[in-house]
Image (tube, rainbow, N blue to C red):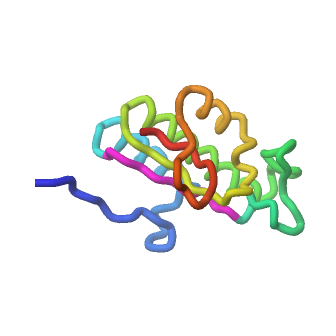
Amino acid sequence: AGLIVGPVLDLTFSRHCDLFSERFFLWLTWMLEEGRLLVVGTEPPCTTWTTARQPALRSSRMPYGFDPRGTATHVGNVCALRSVALLFVALSVGAAAFMEYPRRSMVRSLPPFEQLLAIGAGPAHGDASGEAPSVE
């Protein structure tokens, strides 16, 4: 008798596992709230958040982007904000959660991300990707 580990819910495996999809996001939220998920990990698209992107779509002073309505920026914003929201939900229901992103990602500049850290989520230790907030 142990824990049942579910499948990896990843866009590369199924188009239905897209964090940009409101339906998928609401389903994950419901699964957390119902206690059907004990751990959740998220990884928003890194391509719009990296400091290495040329031309840059955003900066740490403008984390929502220079043109938030641009397709790539909008998708990156929605997925990052939904990732943070899932961490908030996990924190509220006592589930464990983490978010993976590159070390120099500007996702850390988002106000909701900073609020998550302020209410008790802490940086993961030993995480090669950076100071991702984790809820333990």
Q: For the C terminus, give its image quadrant.
A: top left
Return the x and y of residue 135 as percentages of the image width and height. 46, 39
Q: Is residue 122 above or below residue 6?
A: above
Return the x and y of residue 80 as percentages of the image width and height. 63, 49
Q: Residue at x 51, y 54 (%)?
A: 42
Count of labels in the image: 0
The span picked out in magenta is 37-46
Return the x and y of residue 90 as percentages of the image width and height. 43, 37
For residue 49, which quarter of the picture?
bottom right
For residue 2, which quarter of the picture?
bottom left
Q: For the N terminus, give its image quadrant.
A: bottom left
- Give the residue furthest to the left: 1
- Give the residue furthest to the front: 126
> Magenta stretch: dominant SS?
loop
Q: Is residue 38 left or right of residue 99?
A: left
Magenta-span inclusion, residue 39: yes
Magenta-span inclusion, residue 2: no
Q: Is residue 7 left or right of residue 64?
A: left
Q: Residue at x 63, y 54 (%)?
A: 130
Q: Is residue 86 above or below residue 117?
A: below
Q: Is residue 77 left or right of residue 4?
A: right
Q: Is residue 125 above or below residue 15?
A: above
Q: Residue at x 28, y 44 (%)?
A: 36
Please name whichever residue, 32 or 69, is drawn nearer the observer in this view of the structure: 32
- Give the residue furthest to the top: 119
Return the x and y of residue 41 as percentages of the image width and height. 46, 53
- Give the residue furthest to the bottom: 13
Q: Residue at x 40, y 42 (%)?
A: 96
